Image (cartoon, rainbow, N blue to C red):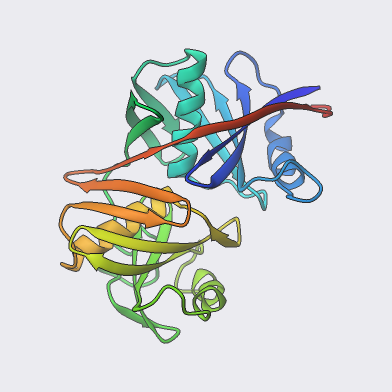
Amino acid sequence: MLHFTKLHGNGNDFILIDEYNEKIIRDNKKAGFALKYCDRRFGIGADGVLFLGRSDIADIRMRIFNSDGTEPEMCGNGVRCLVKYALDKGYIQDKAAVQTLAGVLTISSRREEKTWISVNMGKPQFQRTQIPAKGSGEFLNVALHGYEVSAVNTGVPHAVIFVDSLDDPELMSIAPDIRYDPIFPKGTNVNFVHLDSRNEITIRTYERGVEGETFCCGTGSVASAAIAYRLGKTGKSVKVNTKGGELRITLDDAACMEGTAECVFEGMLEFTP
């Protein structure tokens, strides 16, 4: 029997497997585990699986596998969920460092009615070679599939599109065309953004690896705020509204994301490692 914990960050939900004291699932089995148990009809159901382990260069290590079995470099909501669990277990203190494929992230937390977790997401990368995207220079207001598309890497690649209405039924239909456009060699996540004010935006995100809309995307929220600021549409501090709740993004030398994470339930499943 295998113990798991179900958590979510603003509705972006994850299965967490605790490998802090011992490796439970072999590395070559992790992708298949995610494919099987993220299924919402025949598994537990989740957007991805988090594996929490020890690190030689940070306090803890995060690996994440999407519901399609792919392993992204980073996930903002996933980091908050992992940190929430590690805090509750006593693995880390209120200030800690988390190793990810995108690098080591520093976090801090404060406890109110909920646990608020602030993650230093690093500096958004705007050059096409960093996103990656074909061509040179920055990827800003590029005509693509009938929209003006900008792109940035906030741990993973994100396309950002400003729209007048997020209720347009075409948005999630056109998102896969942008996500798979060959201009993005590794594919991209796609964010549709409505500008509410100089310090507030609302977004919808089509997530690479989930291959559909998610309730919230942390790296997408950072990307949307970063592009909005880059284009002069907002200031450095932005409230980002998502279907699952709000995130607070601050852009200084690095991007800081603050939001909550919650444990939903724990359980046991029949699984042979």
**Does the image show residue 74?**
no
| Vertical comparison of 154 with 52: above or below | below
| Vertical comparison of 86 with 201: above or below | above
Residue found at x 73% / y 39%: 33
Residue pushed farthest front?
Answer: 113
Toward which corner of the image does residue 221 lie, by quadrant?
A: bottom left
Residue 249, image x and y in percent?
A: 27, 47
Residue 64, image x and y in percent?
A: 56, 39
Horizontal placement of 120 versus 27: left or right?
left
Residue found at x 47% / y 14%: 91
Residue pushed farthest bottom?
Answer: 146
For the C terminus, the quadrant is top right
Camera-side residue of 37 and 268: 268
Residue 148, image x and y in percent?
A: 34, 80
Residue found at x 46% / y 22%: 60
Residue 170, image x and y in percent?
A: 52, 81
Camera-side residue of 199 and 134: 199
For the N terminus, the quadrant is top right
**Does the image show residue 112?**
yes
Camera-side residue of 33 and 241: 241
Camera-side residue of 245 and 191: 245
Residue found at x 58% / y 46%: 71
| Vertical comparison of 149 with 82: above or below | below
Total labels: the figure holds 0
